[in-house]
Image (tube, coloured by chain):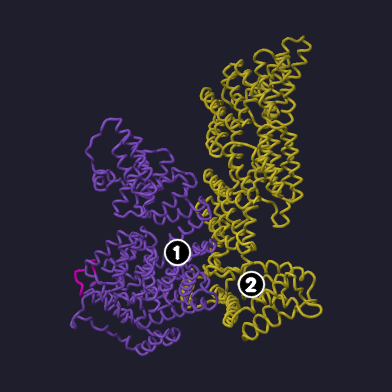
Chain colours: A purple, B yellow
Amino acid sequence: AVIGRAGAMAAAASMVAAAGGGDFSDLREIKKQLLSVAERSRERGLQHSGKWAAELAFALEPLPLSELPPPPVLTEEDARDLDAYTLAKSYFDLKEYDRAAYFLQGCKSQKAYFLYMYSRYLSGEKKKDDETVDSLGPLEKGQVKNEALRELRVELSKKHKAQELDGFGLYLYGVVLRKLDLVKEAIDVFVEAAHVLPLHWGAWLELCNLITDKEMLKFLSLPDTWMKEFFLAHIYTELQLIEEALQKYQSLIDAGFSKSTYIISQIAVAYHNIRDIDKALSIFNELRKQDPYRIENMDTFSNLLYVRSMKPELSYLAHNLCEIDKYRVETCCVIGNYYSLRSQHEKAALYFQRALKLNPRYLGAWTLMGHEYMEMKNTSAAIQAYRHAIEVNKRDYRAWYGLGQTYEILKMPFYCLYYYRRAHQLRPNDSRMLVALGECYEKLNQLVEAKKCYWRAYAVGDVEKMALVKLAKLHEQLNESEQAAQCYIKYIQDIYSCGEVVEHLEVSTAFRYLAQYYFKCKLWDEASACAQKCCAFNDTREEGKALLRQILQLRNQGETSSTDVAAPFFLPASLSANNTPTRRVSPLNLSSVTP
Amino acid sequence: MASVHESLYFNPMLTNGVVHANVFGVRDWVTPHKMALLVLLSELGRAGAQLGLLERRRLNRLLLPLLQGPDMALSRLRKAIEECCPHLARSVHIRLKLMAEGELKDMEQFFDDLSDSFSGTEPEVHKTSVVGLFLRHMILAYNKLSFSQVYKLYTALQQYFQKDEKKDGADENEMELTNPEELDGKMEKEELDGPLREEEIACSGPLSQKQAEYFLSQQASLLKNDETKALAPASLQKELNNLLKFNPDFAEAHYLSYLNSLRVQDVFSSTHSLLHYFDRLILTGAESKSNGDEGYGRSLRYAALNLAALHCRFGHYQQAELALQEAIRIAQESNDHVCLQHCLSWLYILEQKIFDSCVLLEHSVNKSLHFGLPYLASLGIQSLVQQRAFAGKAANKLMDALKDSDLLHWKHSLSELIDISIAQKTAIWRLYGRSTMALQQAQTLLSMNSLEAVNVGVQQNNTESFAVVLCHLAELHAEQGYFAAASEILKHLKERFPPNSQHAQLWMLFDQKIQFERAMNDGRFHVADSLVAGITALNSIEGVYRKAIVLKAQNQMSEAHKLLQKLLIHCQKIKNTEMVIRVLLSIAELYWRSSCHIIALPVLLQALALAREYSLQYLASETVLNLAFSQLILGIPEQALNILHMAIEPVLAHGAMLDKGCAMFLVAKCQVASAASYTPEKKIEALESAISNLNEAKTYFAKVDCKEQLRDVLYFQARLFHTLGKTQERNKCAMLFRQLHQELPAHGVPLINAFK
């Protein structure tokens, strides 16, 4: 055991030394490391980590023959366990875990020992899943347990104390701890694993799942390697720190990973998270060109297509995925979205249910199912589905938002405040929650709070561009004509600066109000400009004409005004220079108690 | 053990997003513990006639908690049976051993045989009895098990049994001396097992639905009636979390968690639990109701209402109002009058916080009676009575109303409301200044057997009414100078309502008030001053008043006057008449202390009028005493004596010791003053009677340990004896006076001029 241990340590140490520093100057070295770790992961049956490393390696330039990493050196122990290992690995690959574990009993080499423990773990997991599917459909967590976990923990903790675990062993120990809900210990072990074997992506990924906020991230002491950059980018995406994540990914691309499908997909997901739909869509399209048989992340893609109501594209995607593999969670999800877009909500719900059967821990499906039930007006089932989503992941803001919407539909504006607030807490810079909150406050006649919400929604960047109109209408109600006019002006600027005029109705009301406001203020030029704009819309045409006549009359009575016509004030070009709206993002201080 | 249970466990309320029906119709499932119970039952049936009467009775009493309670280890079960009947315990053990060490077919055979107990012309077990139901549940649950589950059950049984055996073995092993090496190995193993074992103890397997329901209802009723007996908040929360982990759809657990969070005043988690509860309830409600939509609409209304209650409890009145409006709107839309009534009552409570109007309440009472909601109705009557009492309505009518509502309570056996009603009577009698009546009511409640005691097996309920009554009792005793008794009562209160519990604030306030009074009597003003802060924290008005009294006692007249004026305005605004009168009395006292008796008189008359109007008899008599004193100083002692006759009777009957003493002292003073104009014989007679009155006052003062007043009385008595020429008595009094005078610092105010 001593020799094996020393050998592993030496190998790990050399790797750390090679990987040291967060720089990407030596891409060849990185490629070598990736190839070797992919091989080592595969040997241990860690397919996902192997896949990740291989994918990343594929994105880099191919190595000449001379520089290919040498096959791993076999130690005395490895040789002794080789037969058992070879046999067991083939059983393992055929998912006969118990059988594999049986033949690996008593093996001393690190590789064989890891496979032994790992197959025992997987056997427990498989039995657990079998039991779940066998009896009762998606069960809740905690009801059926992996029985092997406790024994594994005891054995692994002994080894851990004696410091006999290599990077993979530590990773397995961490997984066992996490499954036993011992989160704190698990984090420590994963950090240790990352230190010992920084190239193993699995350990980093587990760490991502366990870290819930930025503060926790700050206090981790992580190894300073190039892998850390990938980890940070990933966790920033998870923690909704999209700006930082995008920066990291950009720098990774600049460092030479521009062909990595992993990075491209992550960037697409990040754009999806900040609702930059166009960018996300184009990146996804690019991704599909590069990797046409990819199923991962396609659920996100379908969400985007859904939001944009791109029926043919979604239909094509659904059929394509169905051809590739119809029993994948993502496929079910895409098909569900497709049906939902075609307003066949029952079928959509069915497919989301199927997704859940395939993977009860697949969070998105619960939320989507909730949406479908909402569409079917089955509020109670929707509430249940959302609650399940929250149970799986408390930080799922869409589920909280969905619950809020449900209660809003049930005409309980006060009651839904709580849910919207939760959603807002999770996504403080998402305008949709703020607008929803504002609407609720408006219904409750708490106009001050409502104003705060709308203003804030505008300040953080309003997606639907409705916050300003709503704010303006509130000001109108409160007879604060000055502010109302300001809001309308800002709104018009916003709309025009986007270059697309989608909602005629609101634009026309804005112009109408402004025309009347300027008319009252006796600013004839501005008033007539606005009135002319009004004439462009059907619903305000008559009013605009009437106003124009009045203005003309009054002008003729009064002195002739200066004739130099300045550039229309509402056009962005003239105003964005001197009057950029001050987007102060002050803390949202709602007077009401926010539990 | 737990892990084996879990795999066996199947949740009857399945969740695939839609269907939550009781899929298997089974609320219970077979566990090794249940099998042990089954063995016990069958052995019981077999032993039958051989058992003695006593053993049989003991066993029968044991059975119910076993059937309802959570699963326990075999050793504990065996011990419990052994205590009742060692013979039976042995045979149960043997049967289990045979089954566990035998084969699977032994277990199958056992279940096949179980149903035999129902058959025959004279079955051992009646089908619908508690035991019969249990047996049938178990048989049904067993029959529903799939092949692999049956096998799992059997292995679980084996482990269950082996664990017990191992434990026995371990106990024996410990006796022996093991060699050090082995000990090391054992230690290490223990170390590793340590945390695991702890977890295992914490979650002793999932509770079945029935067990969980029993647990929840028990804890909930304890929370309501006797908080101290319920599990501590932390451990209760732990249990609940455990329960929810295995059965997240168990909505009631969320509700209990809400109550538990209320206990520790945690807004965040209580809101969270409450909303979660209703989110869960909506679905179950929808199913239980045949008329579709109605079911969950109902729970929506109550969800909003409960949210209002929550906000009200935490003092967020504005939020509460919004939530309540919502509840009312939904209830109105769906024509739910019962819910509307509840809303109305809450509306009243909320309105009360802002301004008092009894229109709403009267309306609520009428409607509640109409819809047959006795609880709500009499709760309404009670708050109505309370409000009217403060508003000075005729006492006989109030008592009549209380009597009527009492009838209602007894009819519907609403024991909680009976308690409240008695506590309220105590408080009202005290408000009116009839301490004997208050005392009697308080004692009634304390010595009454509560209706609920029979059900729960709790000796006495720790509800708010008990706290109120005990507090009054303590204060009454303190007033009479029984300080030891009062502190005994307070000690009892502290035990029953630990400082962080819901009603602890009540006794805290009374405790400090009593201490304050004592400190004032002893003339330790600095101590009293330090208590003021504590009182203010619990009741700001009372605190300000006490502060003014301390200032007055320290001769800081202008500060005291300012404070009292402010307080007077505030109390008049919030219509706290009792406090208004007390403040007026204090202001009057300030005036006569500064020798402005003329100004004091109208103030006193105003106080007297108010006290009469609101029938606060005791305050009225106190005002009369003050009035008499002013008249005495103004030189009309005859007039003073006349009005004193009005007041002296109630004071002697109901007053505190100190007041009694003051009253008698004042009488004596008036007698002496009026005797000046009498003929010599009459004068002597008057002085004699004054001396006897002074003696009485002396005994009163001695009881409450008021040395200052005692000294004054002695001085006065000595002077009287001197006038009468009784030298010996005079010297005695003078000597006593001198002793006291040396102890106490000289008084700033001339003796005769002080009334209190």
Give the camera-side residue of B658 and A353. Answer: A353
Where in the figure is residue B619, as x and y percent of width and height? Answer: 67, 28
Q: Is any part of residue A360 visible from this angle?
A: yes
What amino acid is labelled 1 in the image? Answer: Asn
Label 2 sits on a secondary structure element that is: loop
Q: Which residue is mark 2?
A: B26
Which residue extends farthest right? B121
Magenta stretch prevailing secondary structure: loop
In which chain is the residue bearing label 2?
A: B
In which chain is the residue bearing label 1?
A: A
Give the camera-side residue of B236 and A243. Answer: A243
For this view, does B439 lie left or right of residue B188?
right
Mark 2 Cα-neighbour bin, 10 Å: few <14, some 14–19, many ≥20? some
Q: Which residue is mark 1?
A: A393
Please identify the quadrant where the C terminus of chain B is shown.
top right
For this view, does A369 lie left or right of residue B581?
left
Question: How many numbered marks, from 0 up?
Answer: 2
Figure quadrant of residue B217: bottom right
Please identify the quadrant where the N terminus of chain B is shown.
bottom right
Task: Report the magenta residues as a range.
Answer: A19-28
What amino acid is labelled 2 in the image? Answer: Val
